């Protein structure tokens, strides 16, 4: 609600006596742009704060599984849709990190999550590591 009002000065400063910055500060377009930028920054900060307050991201393997089940109904669908959409059947550590951080929204320690989910010394992770029962059901179904 800050309004820009051009003050009517009784005496105008001589532009030749002003520095470049002083001349720029006196231009209406510069004042307008600064005011608009200030409003936009405030709105953006409020939007980021609202998103952060609404963000209930997961930080452990258990909360990751709970979130995936809540969103996709079961871990097998979550694996196919969110974690392994290319259908490779397994993910490398880098692909796992990318999937859980960017597609799922995991906010915790990725290395800790890997150590909880993958077998020790394994270079990849599969649905079996997350939900062995779902894999057994899928094999029985085939």
Image (tube, grey):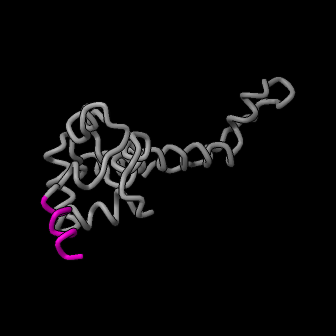
Q: Residue at x 19, y 76 (%)?
A: 141
* Residue 117 on the magenta segment: no
The picture places residue 123, in percent across and down from the top left corner, at 37, 38
In the displayed structure, would residue 23 be above or below residue 57?
above
From the viewer's side, name the closer residue of 51 and 9.
51
In the displayed structure, would residue 14 be above or below residue 52?
above
Hey, which quadrant is residue 16 in on the image?
top right
27 sits left or right of 37 in the view: right
105 sits left or right of 23 in the view: left
Quarter of the image with the C terminus in it: bottom left
Q: Residue furthest bottom?
A: 141
133 sits left or right of 87 in the view: left
Q: Residue furthest right?
A: 16
Number of marks in picture: 0
Which stretch did the figure color magenta? Answer: 133-142
The picture places residue 47, in percent across and down from the top left corner, at 36, 51
Type of secondary structure dominating the magenta stretch: helix
The picture places residue 92, in percent across and down from the top left corner, at 41, 44
From the viewer's side, name the closer residue of 139 and 124.
139
Q: Residue at x 23, y 47 (%)?
A: 57
The picture places residue 59, in percent across and down from the top left corner, at 21, 40
From the viewer's side, name the closer residue of 72 and 126.
126
Q: Residue at x 16, y 55 (%)?
A: 132
From the viewer's side, name the closer residue of 52 and 90.
90
């Amino acid at each position: 609600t800050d309004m820009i009002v051009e003050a009517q000065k009784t005496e105008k400063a001589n532009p030749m006596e002003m520095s470049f910055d002083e001349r720029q500060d006196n231009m209406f377009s510069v004042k307008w742009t600064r005011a608009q930028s200030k409003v936009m920054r405030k709105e953006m900060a409020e939007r980021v704060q609202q998103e952060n307050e609404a963000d209930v991201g997961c930080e452990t393997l258990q909360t990751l599984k709970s979130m995936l089940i809540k969103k996709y109904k079961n871990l097998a669908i979550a694996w196919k849709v969110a974690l392994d959409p290319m259908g490779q059947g397994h993910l490398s550590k880098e692909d796992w990190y990318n999937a859980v951080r960017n597609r799922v929204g995991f906010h915790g320690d990725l290395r800790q999550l890997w150590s909880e989910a993958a077998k020790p010394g394994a270079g990849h992770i599969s649905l079996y590591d997350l939900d062995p029962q779902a894999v057994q059901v899928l094999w029985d179904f085939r």
